[in-house]
Image (spheres, rainbow, N blue to C red):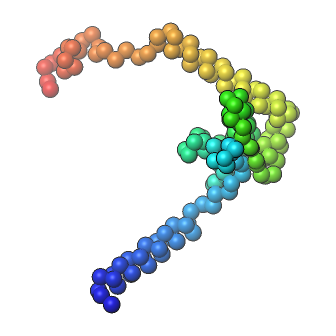
Amino acid sequence: MSINSKIRREAGKQGAAKADGRKRGAAPIEPHAQLRDQQGRLLAGIVRQEGEWVLGMGGQIAGSSASAAHVFAMIRRAALLHEAQGTPVRLTWSDALKDAAWSEVAERAMSFEEFEAGLARDMAEVAARKADTASEGTVPDSSPPDDTPADGRPPDGSP
């Protein structure tokens, strides 16, 4: 056996031990919901990690919240949007997610459908405000202040 092969084998063992240690120390991720298209591709999902509900969409984290109702309503909204665009989807969820979401909205003395409608209204209001702000041209002015020369140097001539 050559010295190089022994070195490679030992390095591989050390790398595997480090990776195994990282896995044991990491917080467990609990999957709770999946939104899939007809081909079975994952479009969105909800996991629970370290007490937070995490919503992933398109391979990226879209957000996280302590509120199960918010993330559950968001993934249901994503399913409706896909369906409206003609993409049939299948949404599955865990009992733990549904129970947490339903009990959260029950504490507010409303049904989950009422909660979803309120969230949709809130999102529409935010979108309308953003559209109004953009149409008013309230983009911050990036020109230098009046006492600053056009070349951007301070008035005292220092670099």
Above or below residue 92? Residue 15 is: below
Coordinates of residue 85 in the picture (x, y in percent)? 67, 29
Horizontal relation, residue 11 to residue 100: left or right: left
Could you tell me which residue is drawn at 66 percent across and 47 percent down?
39
* Residue 118 visible in the displayed image: yes
The quadrant in which the C terminus is found is: top left
- Furthest toward the front, the residue is 39
Coordinates of residue 76 in the picture (x, y in percent)? 73, 37
* Residue 55 visible in the displayed image: no
The quadrant in which the N terminus is found is: bottom left
Could you tell me which residue is drawn at 79 percent across and 31 percent down?
115
Horizontal relation, residue 120 to residue 23: left or right: right
Horizontal relation, residue 114 to residue 120: left or right: right
Give 38 or 92, whichever is nearer the viewer. 38
Above or below residue 81? Residue 5 is: below
Name the image quarter holding residue 117.
Answer: top right
Name the image quarter holding residue 141.
Answer: top left
- Furthest toward the bottom, the residue is 1
Give 151 or 132, whichever is nearer the viewer. 132
Above or below residue 153? Residue 1 is: below
Could you tell me which residue is drawn at 34 percent across and 17 percent down?
142
Give 62 or 41, whichever is nearer the viewer. 41
Could you tell me which residue is drawn at 63 percent across and 47 percent down?
41
Coordinates of residue 31 in the picture (x, y in percent)? 68, 54
